[in-house]
Each structure stands twice: as structure tokens, then as C-alpha cells.
Amino acid sequence: MITNPPTAGVRPLKSIPLDCDLVVGGGGLSGVCAAIAAARAGLKVILLQDRPVLGGNGSSEVRLWILGATSHMGNNNRWAREGGIIDEFMVENVHRNREGNPVFVDALLLEMVQREPNITLLLNTVIYDLEKSDADTIRSVRAFNPQNSTEYILTAPLFCDATGDGIIGFLAGAAFRMGAESKAEFDEGMAPGDEFGELLGHSLYFYSRDTGRPVKFTPPSFALIDITKIPRYKDFSAAEQGCKLWWVEYGGRMDTVHDTEDIKWELWKVIYGVWNHIKNSGRFPEAETMTLEWVGTLAGKRESRRFEGDHMLTQRELVEQISHHDDVSYGGWAIDLHPADGVYSPIDGCTQYHAKGVYPIPYRTLYSRNIKNLFLAGRIISASHVAYGSTRVMATCGHNAAPVGLAAALCKKYSALPRDIAAGPYLAELQRELIKRGQYIPGVALNDPADLAPKAKLTATTTLALASLPASGKYRRLDASWAMMIPVIPGPAPRVTYQVRASAATTVRVELRLSSKPGNHTPDTTLATRKIAIQSGDSTIELAFDATIENREYAFYIIHANPLVETAISDRRVTGILALTHEVNKAVAKSPVQTPPPGVGVDTFEFWLPRRRPNGENLACAIEPPVALFAAGNLVNGIDRPVASPNAWVADPSDPAPAITLAWDRPQRIRRVALAFDTDFDHPMESVQMGHPESDMPFCVSNYTIRDATTGRALIEVAGNHLTLREHVISEPVTTTSLRVEVAPPCANIPAALFALRAYAE
């Protein structure tokens, strides 16, 4: 029993002081990725989250899917899914949770953080104050957990603000912006005028369920009764899960920090009004047996404060894909701006304009320009309002946050501050360590002096020379234009032959296109075009063009739409090879051709998209000369995904036991071996709501063995792999002149492939 007599003064809270190397405020995707990256690099990290679960807008409290540069496969950013820690989460989530249950997202994020011994996780803990050691330096933050009635005083040399609203930066006096810049400030054609408004609003989502029996609904008194106040009310339907009604948005003309509770109440008013309309208007008889199963209680925020770093991203850098010396990440979601009046606006719910490829993000956007020990992560990084329209999405935010965690480790290693890492050998080390951990940085290849693999002679049991994609016996009608995206090298354009059948004699138009920017996958440059007459029945179409390729890149062999013609398709799938069709994905575009109005500073171009599995098979074709870009040397070229070339070793499909051997001139001591697999970076892996066709990516090697080739002894044996990057520490380091990596083909129609093979002494 505890008794406590009256006291004349104020009883103090229980107070716990904690010290660490890095305090990360905010447990959304960004805070999680920053904390894990720092912890794995050896830092002691405290991660604070003001909610009972991790994930922020991606958690079960909000239930928005996690997405980034892949943009629902709706733009021309091929193989653009983010790598590193965010990829580790996305791949594992699909492996466990292909149905997209948001509760399992919570559990996986908690597991990933909990298993890091260097992270102290404080859930339900709200930062409310801080102390500075001088005008430019944070000494400690104060936080309170109402669940255990405890105050925490957290002291560290470094802080990362991943709180979304930037509470650490705000309290510390870091320079920030809120609202939209004028067109003139950064020469941004997409900068909104007053009619469109300055801020993106909040959204709340809901789930419905069919109970199989009639269910009545009585709306609460605060529900919006006059549904016609919503200009798009006719777009509501009983079939649409509320979590896809992203345009039920409000608050863009309010203070999206301090007015959040008022905004949430208005959204509740709208949601219950929408459900009343669906249930009781008489227009949706199919909703008779449906119930409103879940309504969000936490507003999903899009925009509030943006903090100023040493560099501020702007529209031009995104559209023109401008590189910087300190690039550490990338984005690729559309510049996606919404009208400030949200659901009450007569304007379309969003304006999405895409670049022709992914754009790099520099390190200088990831720390405060005036608070010396403050990193920025998530949606508060240094970007204009227009650029923020793209950088704000969760997978991009998570990818941006991993460099923060590793940069913090370098700060400790070299007794440096965040700004010190932005150039010179510190920056080179940051980029190198990021790429080693699976982070893709456009235009930067891994150059790791410690890696022993580039010093070895690499030989493969077989190497694919892609001469054909054999026909499966199935056909695809050319209701839309289709193309095979074929990797090519400088020289005469290869000849590609398609198998077709026509219901009547007709003419088909064929083209050879390239991308105007090497490394992009937007077919905006036409090298040659022809019209070919074909007869009724089976025949072949030869795409032979008198054209010269100048770069190593992808060429688009296009056969245009003709509903009288069907083209044979192939079940063979190969790493770095895709079929595309010219069409629109209405989730992220309004037309198969992006056609912005004059003066907005965005390009006009066509969308050429793959189909999601199980659709999207390749076009059956013959290629002459065969594609010979799958050699073992790709394993050490420092690029671990297809970009301008497949960048993978691919075995011949007939090889029953594919293997790679590394041989050195003299004995090497091997402690660690790392492998990068093909988990299909083109597949977006949305975390919730959208199910996926398989749990594990079909290109990924599942079973492999690493051997000391001089003795034949197995050092590592793995069955059931589904991850992109695997690093193995050999329990007893081996001294040898040769290693052999044996990989089993994923299936009969997909040859074995690897992106990278690295070996280290320590």
C-alpha cells in the first residue's frame, strides 16, 4: 500500500534523464529509418513517438499506403522502388502481409525497431520543451508520456527532427517556412495562386464491411447532412473503400499545426455525412448490408512546416533531374499539389505532374542551416512548397532518412557536425556506406576499396545471351501500343522480330525510340519509324532500322495499336527486361500523355507503363544480335539495379546449377560476403489496401550456397530467401584463393540473377 500525505507545493513528476548519441523525434517511416540506420552504425539512439504505434501516416491509425518514386507503376520511373532500410521493410511486409493488413504494418515496424539493441524506443511520448547549450545548439529535449506519467530529459550531441510538424526545430529556433512561395522566388511555374491556396490539407480514412444482413445507420448530430456542399459528391460510391478517398481533404487554408483538431472535426463531419449519403439516400441499394467498420481518429497530415537547410530543392531541380555533388537519395513521385479547400473545392482534387525520371536529393537538404546539431528527416526537409509536392510521400521520406542516421554516425566518428559531412572525404564515405547498405543514389556507383570482389577474377558457369523470348502460345490484342524495352550498346540498332497474327490484311506502324536522358525510361526521342503491311493470319514483323545507338541505354521497340492484330506473348521473364504499353494509370495521371498548360515548367511526354503481374508478360520476340549485357562483371560495377543497363549477372535458362566463382592470385581472408538479389524494383509494394500477386518476388533467388571453392566446404547455406540484400558473417573466417556462389534458378521461366557480390576481410 502507498499513502501520500497532502503537500502544499506542486508534486514533481517522475523524471528520467537519459543520454545517447542521437535523439530521433518522430516514429513515422522517416524516424524509424533514421534510427535504425544510426543504430546499425553503432550509435546509441533514443526514438520518441507521440503515438502508441510506429509508422505515422502508414500506421493502422491512418492507413495510407507507403509509396514513393514507383508511383503505383503509373509513371516512367522504371525499377525505381527505394532501397536500403525502407526496401527491407517493404519487401518483408509483402512477404508476410501481401493482403495489406495495416495492423501487421504496425507489428513489423515495431519488430524492426525492437530487435535493434542500440535503440531505446519511447512510445506515447510527446516532446514539449528543449534546452540549448548556446544559440545554435540543442542540449536536451523534454518529453512526457501520459501513459506512465513520466517525464524524460534526453541529452545528446545530435538530434534528428522527424516529427512531421518539426516540433524540435520549431522549439530550437530553426529557420522554417509554411505556405507556398511566389512564382518569382524560385521561378516555379507550378507555384499556386490564391485560388488554389498555399497548403495541402489533412485527410481521414474509413473502412466499410459487408455484414451479409441489413444494417441501419443513424448519423451523429454533427454529420454533414447536405452532401451537395461537396462539389464531387457524385463521385462517392458504396464500392469504394474510404481509404482510397484521399481527396476527402480539408484544412489547407488553416494553420495545419495548431488547427489540427478543428480540421479533424470537420473531416469527421464529412465522413459521417458521406456514409449517411451512401446508406440513406436510396441511391446505393448495394449498401443495405454494409456497415461502417472503422473511421480514423488521427488526421493524416500532408503539409505544415518546411525547414531550411543549406540547400532548398525547387521545381526545376525535380523536373530537370539536376544532380548535386552531395546526392544521397532520390524522389520520383509526381509534383502533387492539392487545392487548399480540399473536399469543398470545385477544382480537381490534385494536380500531378511527373518528371521524365527520378531526381536526386542532396544531403544539404537534411540538416538545419542555423541549428548546428539538428538533422531534418521526413516531410520537413528543405524544399520549396512545389518541390515538397513530390518529396513529401512516405517511401521518399524513409529513403531520405537513412542518410541522416549514417551521417550522425560519421559525426560521432570524426567529432563533426552535420554540415561538416556535406563535402570531401566525409561525404564520399557517407555515399559509399549508403550504397553498401542498398541505398540507390542516381549517378553514383559504389567504389569500395575494402571490397575484395573487384580484385578477383569472376567466372560464371553460364551467361545469358538473350536471343529470344519464346512464345507461350498466348496472344495479346493490340488495343493499345506495346513495346519491348531492350538494353542496347553503342553501335547499329539490334533487329527485333515480333510474332503476330491478324484477323484481316492491315498495316502496322512500328518505331524505335530512346530516352533523351541516359538512365531515363521515357521514350521521347524517335530514331526511326516504319509502316509494315501484313496479311491475314500468322506472320512476323521485323523491326529493323537503319539507326545508330550512341550510348549504353534502353531502346523501345514499339508496335502501335491496331485492333486487327494480336502479338504473341512470352512467359519468360528476365531481370532488366520489360514490356510496356502506352496507357494511363488513373491513380496518378489523367491521360496517357502528360500535357501541362503553358508556362508551368513541366514537360509534355507519353507514359509507357508495365502491367502488374500476373499480367504484363513480355512480347515474344527474337533479337539479333542477342543482348550480351548480363556478364559476371556486372556484379562489381557498383550499381545494384537496372538503370541504363540491367547491371546484373544472369545465367542461361538451361543452366541447371548456376554459379559464380571468384578467384584471387593469392590467399584472401574472408569474413563477410554480401549479395544483392532482384526483388523487382519496378513493383511498388504498396503497404496497405492494395493486395499483391505474390508474397515473394519471382525474380529473387531463394536458395543459394557460398563455398570455399578450394576445399568445396559450404560456408553459408540459405533456403527461402526473399530479401534484396543479404550480408553473411562467416563464423570462422576462411583463408582461400577462391569462393563459389551457387544459386538456384527461381523457376523454370526465370533464370537466376544477381546484382552484386561483395567480399570483405572484416
Image (cartoon, rainbow, N blue to C red):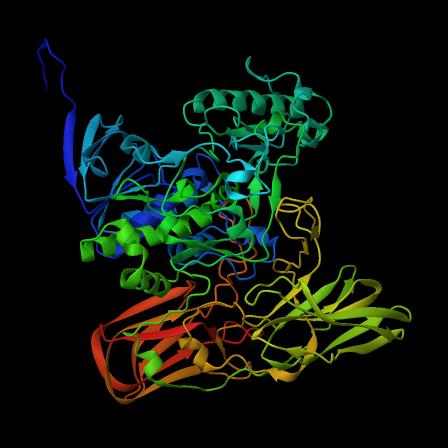
Q: Is residue 406 visible?
A: no
Q: Position of residue 509 (x, y in %)?
A: 81, 68
Q: Report x, y in % for residue 209.
A: 58, 33
- 361 to 279, vertically: above or below: below
Total numbered labels: 0
What residue occupies the far bottom of the structure in this picture? 665
Q: Quadrant of the N terminus?
A: top left
Q: What residue is drawn where x is 61% and y is 44%? A: 352
Q: Residue at x 43, y 61 (%)?
A: 441
Residue occupying the far right of the picture: 505
- Viewer-proximal residue among 32 and 138: 138
Left or right position of 14 against 564: left
Quadrant assignment, res 737? bottom left
- The residue lying furthest to the front in this view is 184
Query: Which of these two is toward me, 483 or 55?
Result: 483
Residue 400 in view? yes
Q: Percent position (x, y) of residue 173?
A: 30, 32
Q: Please, is residue 362 above or below residue 502 in the view?
A: above
Which quadrant is the C terminus positioned in? Answer: bottom left
Tell me where residue 508 appears, x and y as whole percent.
83, 69
Image quadrant in which you'd find residue 429: bottom left
- Above or below, comparing residue 14 to residue 622 in the picture: above
